[in-house]
Image (cartoon, grey):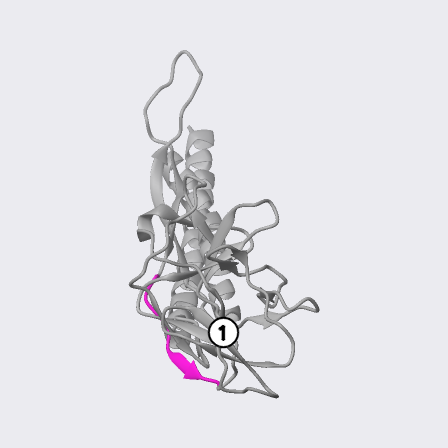
Amino acid sequence: MDRLIYTAMTGASQMLNRQAAVAHNLANVNSAGYRAEEHRLRAVQVQSNAQQKGLATRAFAVDASTHTDFNPGPIMITGRPLDMAVQGTGWFALQMPDGSEAYTRNGGFETNVNGIVQTRNGVPVQGDGGSIAIPPDVKISIGVDGTISAAPETGAQNTVSVIGRIKLVNPPQTDLVRGEDGLFRMRDGSAASTDESVQVAAGSLEGSNVNPAEQMVSMISLARQFEMQMKMLSMADANDRAATQVLSAL
């Protein structure tokens, strides 16, 4: 009974956490470049400071790790000049306010009032030499290697100049960790090196890799598991009452 109570209690709590993760995935089913996440659980024996520890019957179900699904999402053609999608593996590098780098698959970029290429949340895109500024009144084109070129809309329109090149990286997936802002960073806090093999598709966006049907099935399964854990707690309470009545009769 002792083991039943601890396992069921913590199991029910972690089922709620996993339901929250699935709900978060469903909320981002239309978010460009989003990567689905999954919480994985394991059993951990409860540690006691008592001198007489007794039998090792108590165990907690704890959140062991958060797994990220790095499979690519579908690529959708938008025709917008600053929309880009990484083909295959790889990431866009972003220049964070603290000087560090973060990485994203969401290539829906725009320019601010100063012409700086940034995300829609205002984070500048990292170029070879820092941020990338696009001058006014030009028509831009994106190369497969992330190079941004511009041609004037008036005058000598056949004069094309290279403005900059977006930093594209492809670090090992095990070295990446998701931050609270949804962006990925290197686990050791370093900056990933540029990978020349990463290619982008201009005028396109990568969709979320969340499978809605799969997530809905997972949500139903987790709800049933939560109900099972609560029934186990009710069963433990009923057994305790029955045992108390037997002992009282003796």
Q: Position of residue 67 (x, y in %)?
A: 36, 53
| Image quarter of the N terminus | top left
Quadrant of the image occupied by residue 33: bottom left
Residue 43 to residue 79: above or below? above
- Residue at 42%, 40% (x, y): give it: 5
Q: Position of residue 84 (x, y in %)?
A: 45, 74
Query: Disc 1 on helix, strand or loop?
Result: strand
Q: Which residue is mark 1?
A: 161
Specify whether residue 73 is painted magenta. yes
In the figure, is residue 159 to the left or right of 73?
right
Quadrant of the image occupied by residue 54: top left
Of residues 82 and 149, the one nearer the viewer is 149
Residue ranking furthest to the right: 113
Residue 1 to residue 103: above or below? above
Of residues 81 and 215, the one nearer the viewer is 81
Q: What is the crowding at mark 1: few (fewer than 14 residues within 10 Å), some, or many (at least 20)?
A: few
| Image quarter of the C terminus | top left
- Residue at 32%, 48% (x, y): give it: 174
Q: Which residues are the magenta region?
A: 70-78
Q: Position of residue 127 (x, y in %)?
A: 49, 59
Specify whether residue 58 is painted magenta. no
Q: Position of residue 56 (x, y in %)?
A: 32, 26
- Residue at 35%, 46% (x, y): give it: 175
Residue 8 to residue 213: above or below? above
Of residues 49 and 150, the one nearer the viewer is 150
